[in-house]
Amino acid sequence: ASLFNGFLPGIWRNMCPQTEKNLVNWINHLKRRDAQYKEWEANREEPNAVWLSGLHIPESYLTALVQTTCRRKGIALDKATLYTDVTQMTSPDEVKKKPEDGC
């Protein structure tokens, strides 16, 4: 009945991140997430830009960025700070190269 009415079935809802999306938007989001993961895997390197809300748990990715930078620079993890630099870029294609640290 859920599929017929365009709603995310309850059994699916229990196995995915919490969402208020209808079935069509949920499937579109899932396809975009899948495409991001497949591209990342195919290139075997971190992309210049990452769609954070397309990650299952974006906090884990951000934590990994901080940990990787701390290890590389020999900084204690509890002394690290995560910050966001707001840019005028509106498309991932505009990011020509990733920063030395972070993404």
Image (cartoon, rainbow, N blue to C red):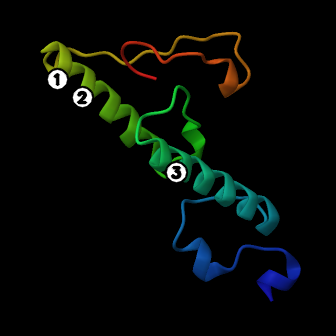
Residue type at tag 3: Tyr
| Quadrant for the N terminus in the image | bottom right
Instruction: Say whether disc 3 or disc 2 marks the residue closer to the N-terminus.
Output: 3
The image position of residue 4, as x and y in percent, is 86, 84
Q: Residue at (51%, 72%) from the top-left corner?
A: 15
Instruction: Say whether disc 1 or disc 3 marks the residue closer to the N-terminus.
Output: 3
For the residues marked 3 and 2, what is the alpha-carbon distance in whole angstroms? Answer: 21 Å
Q: Mark number for residue 15?
A: none
Circle 1 or circle 3, nearest the eye: 3
In this view, the residue in front, 83 or 64, is 64
Pointer 2 residue? 67
Instruction: Kindly indicate whether the residue at mark 3 contacts the one at mark 1 (C-beta within 8 angstroms).
Output: no
Q: Mark number for residue 71?
A: 1
Taking the image as shown, residue 90 lies to the left or right of residue 72, namely: right
Q: Residue at (59%, 16%) from the top-left corner?
A: 96
Residue type at tag 1: Arg
The image position of residue 46, as x and y in percent, is 43, 34
Residue type at tag 2: Gln
For the residues marked 1 and 2, what is the alpha-carbon distance in whole angstroms? Answer: 6 Å
Instruction: Kindly indicate whether the residue at mark 2 contacts the one at mark 1 (C-beta within 8 angstroms).
Output: yes
- Give neighbour class at mark 1: few <14, some 14-19, many 20+ (Cα, 10 Å): few
Taking the image as shown, residue 45 lies to the left or right of residue 30, namely: left
Q: Residue at (59%, 37%) from the top-left corner?
A: 51
Residue sticking out furthest to the bottom: 1
In this view, the residue in front, 26 or 10, is 26
Pointer 3 residue? 37
Circle 3 or circle 2, nearest the eye: 3
